[in-house]
Structures are given as C-alpha cells and as structure tokens.
Image: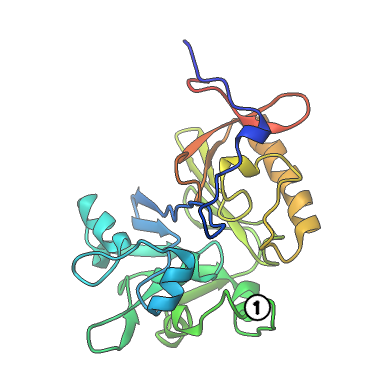
Amino acid sequence: MFGVVPKPLWEKRIPADARNRIQLGMRCALIEHESGLILIDTGSGNKENEKFIDIYGIENAAPDGRTMLEQGIREAGHRPEDVQLVVNTHLHFDHGGGNTYRDAAGAVKLSLPNARYVVQHGEYHYATHLNERTAASYFAHNFVPVLEAGRFDLVDGEHEVVAGVRVMPSPGHVPFHQCILLSSRGEHAIYLGDLCPTSAHLALPWIMGYDVEPLVTLETKRRVLARALAEGWRLIFEHDATVAMGRLAHDGKNYTLAPEGK
C-alpha cells in the first residue's frame, strides 16, 4: 500500500496571515458510548464580544444563534440534550467556552444541560485563581455556572471516567491539563488537547508559546509519545485545521506522522 511521505519539519510550519495569525481548528470529539453520548472539549462558545472574535478570527457561529458545536451534534444525528458526559482537557476559552452559551436574552446557560462535566480538580482551582499571565485565557462564565449547577465532577490524577475513557494528567501547557485515552476492542486513541495541538508539534522541542511550563511540556511529550509509539495509539489533534488524526512514527531523531495506511 502506498502512502504519503511526511514532510520535513521545516515544511510543516503553518503559514501566517497578514496579522501574523495561523489557521487552527477547534476539533471536539463526540463518542457514542454504551453509557450515553460523551463529548471531549466544547470549543469557544458564543459569549464573547465582536472585538474578541475579530482578534482571534473565530468562525464558530451557527444560524440559530448557537455554535457549530451544537450544529455538529445535530448533524451526527443527536441533540445537545443527549450528551451525558463532557470531558474538558482544561478550561481555556477555546476548550471549555462551549460548556455554556448566552441566550437571546443575555442569560448564560449550560450548553449540554443533561451532562456531567469532568475536569481535573487542580485545573478548576487554577482557572479561578488568576494572574496577569493566565487571565486572558480563563473566563468564569465558561465554567463557574457548571459548578453552581452542581454538574462538575472534579477528579484528581489519572481516572477512568467510564469504561474505555481515561483521563491522563499531561502538565505543561497548564499545570493540570489532561489528555483523554480512548480504548475499544483492543484499539487505543489519545485526544491530545494542547499537549500537541497540531501534527507540526510532534517534534519534542516544538512547544507553543502559550505554554506556562514549556520544559514540563517537553517531558510530558517525551513520556506520552513514547508510550503512544510503543503501543500503536492513534493521535487525535484538536487544533490542526487539516489533520484530524494519525499514527506516530519516529525517524531516528524526531517524532512525526506515519505515512498514510501505516
């Protein structure tokens, strides 16, 4: 079987626009599980103002006033009310912003009203005790209403939330970031969140400027990617605008995507 040979690292840089922005996705994962629908991350929601949307170039609006998240759930044959569990990798606005939405009257409500929401206990504390570096990424209206509604399940450390869905601490981007390991019928996939936001970030030293603990990210990537390679996990990229998932390879120096079909 023929495949596409991965490009060298220097060809994987995402071109910037005139405002020095690169194109990214906000890829949430909807899992049809025997216990009910599970959603991993929720995108940016609909609550921010026009200036914010312009700065980040967010294209997220749906015709009904909600977002492409709810629209995507419906296109998959379900309703937002059907989601039973939401797992947040962390609570930055582009990962937990869709936990809640603002209705036509301006009220903030839960986007998935019948779901329990799972995040690391330390992450909730970190998101509610801000400093000058972190305040631009955490907005209380994305997660405080979830806690006030009694819908958060705050976990500590590695934890299997339901059969085949395991949260794994992966610090660096923020101290209590978590990846989600999905297991079914002997196959495994890991939702990487912001540990490796795009396929271009697989090389160990390629780390986002957003990371608050970049050297911790480096060691977390070393540990997680070594296991992913050894055990043949699929990788799911949340922010890669063109590559949704793939398997890992190592060229003797760097981690990269395996050729298609491998």
Between 258 and 117, the residue placed more toward the observer is 258
Decide: is 54 above or below 238. below
Residue 155 % position (x, y): 58, 69
Tally the numbered discs.
1
Q: Name which residue lies at 51% across and 53% down.
A: 17
Which residue is denoted by mark 1 in the rendering? Answer: 126
Please provide percent x and percent y for residue 203: 70, 39
Q: Residue at x 23, y 72 (%)?
A: 65
Give the amino acid at mark 1.
Tyr
Q: Is residue 94 above or below residue 193?
A: below
Question: With 202 as the anchor, is 252 left or right in this view?
Answer: right
Q: Nearer the viewer, residue 239 or 23?
A: 23
Q: Is residue 204 left or right of residue 164?
A: right
Residue 48 sits above or below residue 13 on the image: below
Visible residue check, residue 117: no
Q: Residue furthest front?
A: 18
- Mark 1 nearby-residue class (10 Å; few <14, some 14–19, many ≥20): some
Q: Which residue is more in the foreground, 68 or 70? A: 68
Residue at the image point whose x is 52% and y is 38% from the top: 188
Q: Give the residue at x 51% y 56%.
A: 18
Picture coordinates of residue 93, whole percent (x, y)? 50, 71
Does 146 sit left or right of 219 as displayed?
A: left
Q: Quadrant of residue 81?
A: bottom left
Percent coordinates x, y for residue 225 in the rendering: 68, 40
